[in-house]
Every structure is written in structure tokens, then in C-alpha cells.
Image (cartoon, rainbow, N blue to C red):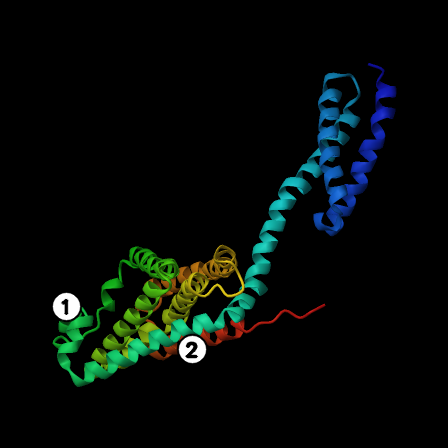
């Protein structure tokens, strides 16, 4: 092989790849039009072949090192750069995309919240009017512990925090995914879960109130509940979106409605998962911790809720 002639014939590709890489390294892969992105990928493959050929010929170490550096830079931008853009897309979604979806689907989330509150109100009313109603909702062991022993049950978490936190996360995820999947029953199962969980919290709240344990109980609930309950309401909203597509597709064909509303529901699920992980961690490690003063637990819970309200109402400014 005539090395000088080969270098002269291939050098234009190396220089062109260098030019494209400088732009990508400075402004990102998105700064290139689609045609130049394809050119970049093609040049990377071509220069990689040149490097392999150069290693088998006596072309000099300096040229081999230069080609090695060029292919390494190209590989980084094409492959690792795409991964970086994926992470940027994730960051963009949680920064602005999720708040936008929450605002767009708020009527469905509000409906899920209203059902939960209705269940809580019904349980509160009947638990005060009829003591036997309590045993229909709350486990008997919990009633005995609160009513007879005048103790809350959260102390059992202390000492097994990692296990308890994992179990709490799994349980909350199961409830939330059940609420989302309930959409395929035209929202009936979703509505049942919202009402039942409302009944449960209403009955338990009444039980601890009747036995003068409301203050420590709500101190336990507030820190994680300020995130956990909204996440469940988001899940309920996602389920009702699917139910809406099945029952009232409107101007869409039912299949198209499922795609549209299903896409919104999936995006809500992307928001629910990290919320429940955070809530489960707080519920396992912070909420039951006897060393944390009760007023601080209330303060943390209210702070997290205010932050969530602010976050959910964020609007991206138009450039």
C-alpha cells in the first residue's frame, strides 16, 4: 500500500469528522441536522476502518494515535452522548413535563381525591354513630391496641426500618398500580380503591381520635402522607383516564382514545413511582422514629405538601 497516497485519499474524511465533532462537543448532538447526524455516524464507521487498516500497516504511531483519539471522541458523542440526551430528557420530564401532565389531568385527579374524601367522611360519620361499624373496616388487633392498650402500632417499625420501608413501598406501589389498572374496568375498580382507602383512613382517624391519640397518629402520617396520598390520587386519576377512553372516547375512535388517554396515564405513573419510593423511605425511617419531635414531623409534612403543590403548578416560561 502506498501510505502517502492512502493518507491523502482518506484525510478529507478525518478532517470532516473533526469539524462535526467540534460542533457536537460544543453544542450537543441536537445542533446537527438529521443529514449531518447520519454523516457523523458514517464517518465514524469509515474512520474506525481506517484505524484498523493503519494498525496493520507501517503508517507511524502519531497517525495511529490521532485516528484512535478521533474514533474515541466520535464513539463518545454518538453512543454516550445519546445516553446523556436520554438523561436530559428524563430531567426535562420531571422538571416541566410532569407538572404539565398533572395540570392537564387535574379534573381526573380531583375526582379520585373527592372519592377518597367521601369515603373518609362516610367512615368518620358512621364510626361516631355506630361503634360496631369500626370493626367492619379496621382490623380487630388494631382496635384492641388503640382502644384497650392506648398505644399506636407504628412502634413495631422501629428496629426493622429497611425491611419495613421495602414492604411499605411494595404495598403502596401495588395499591397505586391497582388503581391505574382499574381503568380497564371502566374505572369501577379504581373508584372502589379510592373509596375503600378513604373509608380506612377515616375509620382509623376516628379510632385514634376517640382514644386521644390523634396528635401522635397524624404526626406519624403527615411526613409521608403528604406525598403518598397525592401519589395515590394521581394513580386514581390515571385509572379514570383509561376509564374515560373506554366509556367516553368523544371525538376519537376508542382505540385512538386509549392511546391518547393511556399516554397521559403512563406519564402520571412515571411521576407516581419516585413519589412512592420517597414516601416509603420517609414512612420507614422518619415517621415512626421516636427521637424526632412530633412538631417537627408536622412541619416536615406540611413543608413537603407545600412543595408538592408548588411543583405541580409549575409552568415553563416560553422563550
Picture disc at residue 213: none
- The C terminus sits in image quarter: bottom right
Q: Is residue 99 visible?
A: yes
Q: Is residue 290 visible?
A: no
Please, which residue is most extreme toward the bottom here? 129
Q: CB under 8 Å between callouts 1 and 2? A: no
Q: Give the mark, 1 or 2, whose residue is nearer the N terminus.
A: 1
Q: Quadrant of residue 63?
A: top right
Residue 264 against residue 39 in the figure, above or below: below
Q: Along the horizontal axis of the image, is 116 left or right of 19?
A: left
CA gap, disc 1 and disc 2: 30 Å
Q: Quadrant of residue 239?
A: bottom left
| Residue occupying image coordinates x 54% and y 68% | 99
Q: Check disc 2 and report its element: helix, strand or loop.
A: helix
- The N terminus sits in image quarter: top right
Q: Position of residue 216 (x, y in %)?
A: 28, 77
| Residue occupying image coordinates x 30% and y 56% | 167
Residue 220 against residue 29 in the figure, above or below: below
- Within 10 Å of disc 2 (Cα), the crowding (few <14, some 14-19, many 20+) is some
Q: Check disc 1 and report its element: helix, strand or loop.
A: helix
Q: Position of residue 113 (x, y in %)?
A: 39, 74
Q: Position of residue 107 (x, y in %)?
A: 47, 73
Residue under numbered circle 1: 141
Picture disc at residue 302: 2
Q: Along the horizontal axis of the image, is 275 left or right of 122?
A: right
Q: Quadrant of residue 284?
A: bottom left
Amino acid at each position: 500500500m502506498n501510505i502517502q497516497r492512502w493518507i491523502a485519499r482518506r484525510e478529507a474524511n478525518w478532517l470532516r469528522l473533526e469539524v462535526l465533532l467540534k460542533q457536537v462537543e460544543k453544542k450537543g448532538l441536537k445542533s446537527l441536522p438529521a443529514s449531518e447526524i447520519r454523516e457523523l455516524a458514517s464517518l465514524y464507521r469509515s474512520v474506525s476502518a481506517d484505524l484498523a487498516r493503519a494498525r496493520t500497516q507501517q503508517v507511524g504511531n502519531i497517525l495511529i494515535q490521532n485516528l484512535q483519539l478521533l474514533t474515541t471522541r466520535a464513539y463518545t458523542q454518538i453512543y454516550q452522548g445519546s445516553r446523556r440526551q436520554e438523561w436530559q430528557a428524563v430531567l426535562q420530564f420531571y422538571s416541566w413535563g410532569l407538572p404539565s401532565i398533572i395540570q392537564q389531568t387535574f379534573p381526573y385527579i380531583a375526582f379520585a381525591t373527592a372519592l377518597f374524601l367521601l369515603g373518609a367522611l362516610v367512615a368518620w360519620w358512621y364510626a361516631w354513630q355506630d361503634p360496631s361499624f369500626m370493626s367492619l373496616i379496621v382490623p380487630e388487633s388494631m382496635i384492641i391496641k388503640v382502644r384497650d392498650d392506648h398505644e399506636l402500632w407504628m412502634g413495631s417499625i422501629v428496629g426493622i426500618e429497611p425491611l419495613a420501608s421495602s414492604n411499605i413501598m411494595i404495598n403502596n406501589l401495588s395499591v397505586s398500580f391497582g388503581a391505574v389498572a382499574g381503568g380497564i374496568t371502566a374505572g369501577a375498580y379504581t373508584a372502589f380503591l379510592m373509596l375503600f382507602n378513604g373509608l380506612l383512613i377515616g375509620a382509623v382517624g376516628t379510632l385514634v381520635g376517640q382514644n386521644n391519640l390523634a396528635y401522635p397518629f397524624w404526626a406519624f402520617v403527615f411526613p409521608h402522607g403528604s406525598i403518598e396520598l397525592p401519589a395515590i390520587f394521581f394513580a386514581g386519576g390515571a385509572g379514570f383516564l383509561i376509564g374515560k377512553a373506554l366509556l367516553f372516547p368523544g371525538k376519537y375512535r376508542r382505540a385512538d382514545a386509549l392511546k391518547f388517554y393511556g399516554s397521559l396515564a403512563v406519564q402520571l405513573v412515571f411521576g407516581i413511582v419516585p413519589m412512592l419510593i420517597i414516601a416509603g423511605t420517609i414512612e420507614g425511617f422518619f415517621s415512626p422514629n421516636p427521637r424526632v419531635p412530633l412538631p417537627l414531623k408536622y412541619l416536615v409534612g406540611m413543608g413537603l405538601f407545600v412543595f408538592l403543590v408548588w411543583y405541580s403548578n409549575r409552568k415553563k416560561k416560553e422563550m
